[in-house]
Amino acid sequence: MRIVRRSLALFLAVVLIAPSAQAQTQNHVIDPSALAAAVQEKVTQDQADREAILSLLQRAEVREIAAKAGVSLEKAEAAVSTLAGEELRDLASQARQAQNDLAGGASTVVISTTTIIIVLLLIILIVALAD
């Protein structure tokens, strides 16, 4: 009789506890659609950041500054695709700031904008050479 009671108790424990443990496990799983949306958002933001940098590199003012500084824009443009993470975000932020400064209606390039552009170009080239 003891064996029957223990077996019954074990059976009830498995039957009653296992489904609630399984339900708890399922609550911690990330929804696949939410994960896909987060990944897509990251890809979209990275692409927008790269486009901001490339857009700045294609400006006539930047090409002139790069030529005077002896910097190859082709190498810089190729290196943009290797940027990632915080490096990409920081450079994109600086590129957007330089774009805003240049688009602000000034007919000449302000020294701070020129400095930002040169620093951007150098960082991009350093990253390209490091890879």
Image (cartoon, rainbow, N blue to C red):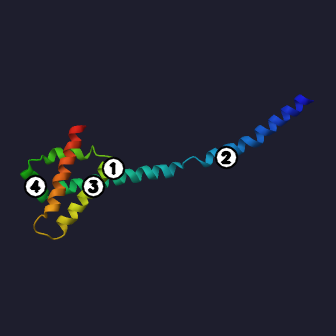
Q: Secondary structure at mark 1?
A: helix
Which element type, helix, strand or loop, lies under badge 3?
helix
| Residue 71 to residue 1: above or below | below
**Does residue 37 show up?**
yes
Cβ atoms at labels 2 and 1 below 8 Å apart? no
C-beta proximity under 8 Å, tags 4 and 1: no
Disc 2, SS: helix
**Residue 113 placement: quadrant:** bottom left
- Distance from disc 4 to disc 1, alpha carbons, whole Å, reads 26 Å
Q: Position of residue 80 (x, y in %)?
A: 24, 47
Query: Tags 1 and 3 in contact by the CB under 8 Å rule?
Result: no
- Name the N-terminal-most of marks 2 and 1: 2
**In the displayed structure image, the side of residue 29 where residue 81 appears, left or right:** left
Q: Which quadrant does the N terminus fall into?
A: top right
Task: Pinpoint residue 21: horizontal percent, then vertical percent.
Answer: 69, 43
Tags 3 and 4 touching, CB below 8 Å = no
Q: Specify few, some or many for label 3: CA neighbours under 10 Å numbering under 14, 14-19, or 20 or more.
A: many
Residue 23 - label: 2
Ranked by sequence position, the earlier of labels 4 and 1 is 4
- The percent coordinates of residue 47 (x first, y second) are 31, 52
Query: Badge 1 is on which residue?
Result: 86
Q: Find the distance from the CA under tag 3 to the CA under tag 2.
A: 44 Å
At horizontal 40% and vertical 54% (from top left) the residue drawn is 41
Q: Which residue is mark 3?
A: 92
Residues 58 and 107: in front is 107
First in sequence: mark 3 vs mark 4? 4
Quadrant where the C terminus sits is: top left
